Amino acid sequence: MTKLPMSWLIKNKDEFIDALMHLSDSHTIGSGFLLQEECDDIIFDNFCEWLREVNNKTGIATLMYIDDFDPKALGLDEFRKNIRKDENTDK
């Protein structure tokens, strides 16, 4: 998705938003994002930065999706810390 030219996104705005909504749903419904590992965070950070760029360059409203992909907004560090704490307590 990030390789698509901005001109394509503008021309196919509805299809782009639909794909973005499906991607958002697949990442958040059922808490799938909790399976995201720390090494994957950079991918999602870059994707969120790209969404900001798309918003700024095309005027397509993509900022509302950032919290669905941003590891910080999703609280993944805190979740991982609690998981590690629980794993260490169980030993």
Image (cartoon, rainbow, N blue to C red):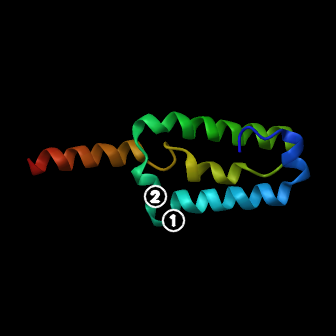
Q: Which structural element holds mark 2? A: helix
Q: Nearer the viewer, residue 85 or 28?
A: 28
Q: Which structural element holds mark 1? A: helix
The answer to whether mark 2 and mark 1 are in CB contact below 8 A is yes
Residue in the picture at 62% in, 57% down: 23
Q: In this view, does 27 lie above or below 1?
A: below
Question: Is residue 21 something one can see in this rendering?
Answer: yes
Q: In this view, does 39 lie above or below 34?
A: above
Q: Is residue 83 above or below residue 45?
A: below
Image-quadrant location for residue 21: bottom right
Q: Position of residue 72 (x, y in %)?
A: 49, 42
Crowd class of label 2 (few under 14; some 14 to 19; many from 20; radius 10 Å): few
Q: Which residue lies furthest to the bottom in this view?
A: 30
Cα distance, mark 2 to mark 1? 7 Å
Residue identified by numbered label 1: 29
Residue in the picture at 87% in, 54% down: 12
Left/right placement of residue 15 relative to residue 68 reads right
Q: Which of 79 and 18 is in front in this view?
A: 18
Left/right placement of residue 86 relative to residue 7 reads left
Q: Which amino acid does label 1 sit on?
A: Ile
Q: Where is residue 76 in the image (x, y as percent from the top left)?
A: 41, 46
Q: Position of residue 79 (x, y in %)?
A: 35, 49
Q: Which residue lies furthest to the left in this view?
A: 91
Residue in the picture at 40% in, 42% down: 37
Crowd class of label 1 (few under 14; some 14 to 19; many from 20; radius 10 Å): few
Q: Residue 32 carries which label?
A: 2
Left/right placement of residue 21 relative to residue 40 reads right
Q: Residue 89 carries which label?
A: none
